[in-house]
Amino acid sequence: MRLVASDRVHVRVPSICAWAVIAGLLAGCSRTGGTTEVSPSENASPRTTERPSTYEATFPGPTKKGLERVPTDAGVLETHSETYAGPQGSCNVMWTDYPDAWVRRKTPRGLLLGAADGAARASRATIESKRETTFDGHAALEFVAKDPNEDAVYRSRAVLAGNRLFLLSVIGTQQGVDSAPFVAFERSFRLRPAR
């Protein structure tokens, strides 16, 4: 963790490396005790090898990109990240590609719930709310986690597009994550086909 400071606000936000580790944990994470099977009509994502989606988002300021290779139960996975860190907190997009064979053995719901649980566990936060949904036609899970020891709020959306897991997060105080630049960042996020 590092301290990001301005004249009025002091917010502790995870560094880009910490979030890369979290994304790696997400990539190998599945809910213990088995996953809940859902019918294909319930938040199903395509199970075929396809050109993975990419994304576009308007960050509040300059970003830093990162790449980390993380050993998981699905093998060594590359976790990519793009992060803006400012005085009110941070805005992040991370993505990890799972092996096709590994994804076929899981359910979209199980992968997304594992992502939320892994993110909360790795950041020592408690999940306050979860909502299963879809995003651009793909299975998605929106969740909010809080760390009362640091007055930190983690508002996230996990999206499974084929075998690629995206995690969009805004992190900061409640005032920071509800600020206009952070809300605009969340609203600007879109998936698009890779070229």
Image (cartoon, rainbow, N blue to C red):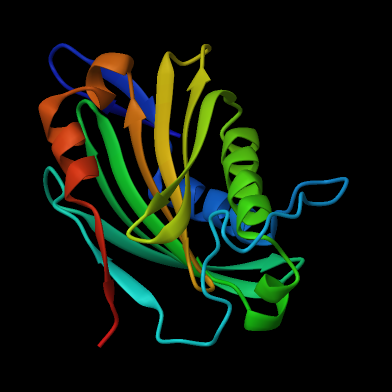
Where residue 28 sits: x, y (%)? Answer: 69, 60
Q: Quadrant of residue 104?
A: bottom right
Which percent across, then down, holds residue 134?
Answer: 42, 51
Give the mark count.
0
Q: Nearer the viewer, residue 137 or 102?
A: 137
Identify the image quadrant of the N terminus.
top left
| In the image, residue 33 above or below residue 54 | above
Q: Residue at x 41, y 57 (%)?
A: 94
On the rendered structure, is 25 left or right of 184? right
Q: Nearer the viewer, residue 46 or 114?
A: 46
Is residue 167 shown left or right of residue 37?
left
Q: Position of residue 14 (x, y in %)?
A: 43, 37
Q: Is residue 121 left or right of residue 30?
A: left
* Residue located farthest toward the right when viewing the structure as drawn: 33
User: Is 125 located above or below residue 112 in the figure?
Assistant: above
Q: Quadrant of residue 40?
A: bottom right
Residue sitting at 40 percent across and 86 percent down? Answer: 51
Q: Is residue 47 above or below residue 82?
A: below
Taking the spot 52% from the left edge, 74% from the top edge, the residue there is 46
Please tell me which residue is depicted at 61% across the width and 28% down the height of the picture: 124
